[in-house]
Image: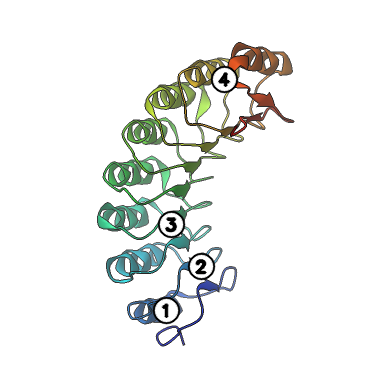
Amino acid sequence: MLEFNKTLTKFYIRDNDVKYESVKLIGKALKKNKILACLDIGGNMIGDGIAKFFSEVFKSNKTLTQLATDANKITHEGAKLIAEALTNNKIVSSLDLRYNHIGDKGAILLSEALKVNRMLTSLKLARNYIEIEGIKSISEMLKINKSLTKLNLNGNSIKNKGATHISEALKANKILTNLKLRQTYIEDKGVESIVEALKFNIALTKIDLRWNRIYDEEITAAAEAVKDKKIKLGHYSQFCLPTS
């Protein structure tokens, strides 16, 4: 069907216990498909085979701009294939890799790819067992990346040290507008470094710090410190910067 499709632009097959053999058939069809723009194959626990599928699709398909492969047990080996494909890809703008197992190694590989990729605008890496080395690499990438506007790092082990790396990236970055750091084990000191960076950042419009280890009085003090930026304090330790 997909091979000859001329009308369907979005295809959702998430949470369907899809096997790798079926995925290969989809990949074969997508090599000829000239209309599909969005493919969601998340929640199928396929493994690194799904990454191989995406890397092949990236090479040949000229229409897919949004790809979701969350919750598919992708490791750093799969991340390597995706990173290699992203290096030269000029089509995909949104990539969802949440709830996988890429770890620091996978985060480093993807970061290197995004130093040269100029197309991806949205990347979701929530709950991928990324710790300090991976966060450091992502931060270095953010200093030079020219396209990424949305980044989701929720549920990774960022902590205060990682928050410091992110802060340095935010001082240099002029593109990122939405950053999610929910439940990343950041404490007061980490928030202080991020808030200090926001004094220099001119692009960020929203940063989510909910469900971290931050006292209400520290959040209030942090918001006061950057009041000239009109940062609004939401519920559960969430900063929200208005766009106007």
- Mark number displayed over residue 26: 1
Left or right of 141 on screen, residue 181: right
Q: Name which residue type carries label 4.
A: Val
- Residue shown at the point (70%, 16%) measured from the top left: 220
Cα–Cα gap, marks 3 and 4: 31 Å
Q: Looking at the image, is mark 3 or mark 1 earlier in the sequence?
A: 1
Secondary structure, mark 3, is: loop
The residue tagged 2 is: 41
Outermost front residue = 244
Q: Looking at the image, is mark 2 or mark 4 earlier in the sequence?
A: 2
Q: Is mark 2 in CB contact (under 8 Å) with mark 4?
A: no
The residue tagged 4 is: 191
Cα–Cα gap, marks 3 and 2: 13 Å
- Mark number displayed over residue 74: 3
Secondary structure, mark 4, is: helix
State the image quarter where residue 155 is shown.
top right
Cα–Cα gap, marks 3 and 1: 18 Å
Q: Name which residue type carries label 1.
A: Ile
Secondary structure, mark 1, is: helix
- Mark number displayed over residue 42: none
x then y, percent, for residue 23: 43, 75
Q: Is mark 2 in CB contact (under 8 Å) with mark 1?
A: yes
- Residue shown at the point (48%, 42%) measured from the top left: 151
